[in-house]
Image (tube, grey):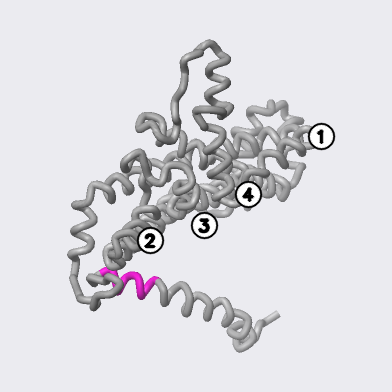
Amino acid sequence: MKIKRHWLLLFLSPGLALFLFVYFASIVSVVGTSFTDWRIGQEMRLSGLRNYLSLFQSASFLKALGNNIIWILLQSTIHVAVGVLFCLIIAWKKNKWYAKASQTLFMLPNMLSSAALGMLFYNIFNPMYGPVNKVIKALGNADFNINWFANADTAFFAVTVTWLPFAAIVAILGAAELSAIPDDIFEAAYIDGATELQTNLYIKLPLLKNAIGTATILAATSMLQKLDILVMTTNGGPGIATMNLPLFIYNTAMRDNNFGLSNACAVLLIIIGLISIGVVNKLYRMNDAVLS
C-alpha cells in the first residue's frame, strides 16, 4: 500500500519540530557561544578558539577527559560483558523460578533515581558502617579501614562500581532479543549434539550482535551524562581524581561563571559521543542483517 507523502509529513512533523526547536537549536547555540567569552553580568565578546586552547591547557579538563575515556572503555566492555553473561544464564535457566526472580532483583537498582543510587553506594562503601569494609575485616584484615570515595587510590575504582547496575539494562536488551529468535534454531543445535557453551558461543552470541551493539552504544554514551552520582559520592575528588566532563562543564559554568569555556567543553563532549557511536557501529556492523 502506497503511503501519501502529506500524511507521512504530518506524522513526522511533531518529532521533526521537537528536534529542530529543542535539540538542533540548542546544539547550534552551544557551538556558537563556545567561540565567545560569555560570563553572566558581562558583555558577550567573540574570543575565537581561545576557549578550546584553554581547555587543553587545563589540568582539570585533561583529567576529566582521560577519566571519561577510561570509563567509556570499561562501561562498553566489562559492564556490557557482565550483562551479556547474565542474559545467557537467564536464557539457560529461563524456566526456573530463581532465574526470573534474579532478573527482577538485578533490575531493581535501575528503578532508583541516580541520586538515590549514589547515596546507596556511598553507604555501601562507608568506612564506618558500610558492608564492604565489614566483610573485608571479617575475612581476617581487622585493621582495614579505607574511605573508598575519599582515598585517591580507591576513589576511581569505587566510582566505577557505581556504574555496574547498567549491566541489568544490557541483560534486559539481550533477553528481549533472544526471546524473538525462533526456538527451532537452538533445538536443532542441541539435536546435533551442541553443548550449552557451544550454543552460546556460536549461535546465541552472533545472533545477539545487534542487541549487544545497541547496549554498547547506550553504555558508552551514558558515561557522557553521569553527573548526579558523581556529585553524591566524590564531587570529582579527592582533588580531581574522579573528575569527568559533565562535572567539569557544570563547575565551569555554575562555579566559575565561564559559560563560553563550558560550552566549548560541551561541544567536545558531543564530538566524543558521535565518535563513540560511529566506532561501535563499525565494530558491530549494526547495519548488517543478523538473520537472512
Amino acid under label 2? Ile
Secondary structure beneath label 2:
helix
Q: Mark 4 sits on what residue?
A: 112
Q: Earlier in the sequence, mark 2 or mark 3?
A: 2
Q: CA distance from mark 2 to mark 1?
A: 43 Å
Residue 33, quarter of the rendered image: bottom left
**Mark 4 vs mark 1: in front:** 4
Q: Residue at position x 63%, y 53% from top?
A: 292
Q: Mark 1 sits on what residue?
A: 97
Is 262 or 77 nearer to us in this picture? 262
Q: Earlier in the sequence, mark 2 or mark 1?
A: 1
**Mark 2 vs mark 3: in front:** 2
Q: Residue at position x 53%, y 11% from top?
A: 140
Q: How many marks?
A: 4
Residue 191's spot in the image, x, y percent?
76, 30
Secondary structure beneath label 1:
helix
Residue 92's spot in the image, x, y percent?
72, 33
> Is residue 64 on the magenta stretch?
no
Q: Residues within 10 Å of mark 4 (few under 14, many from 20)?
A: few
Secondary structure beneath label 3:
loop
Secondary structure beneath label 4:
loop
Q: Which residues are magenta?
A: 27-34
**Mark 1 vs mark 3: in front:** 1
Q: Mark 2 sits on what residue?
A: 270
Q: Is residue 147 above or below residue 5?
A: above
Q: Residue at position x 37%, y 48% from top?
A: 244
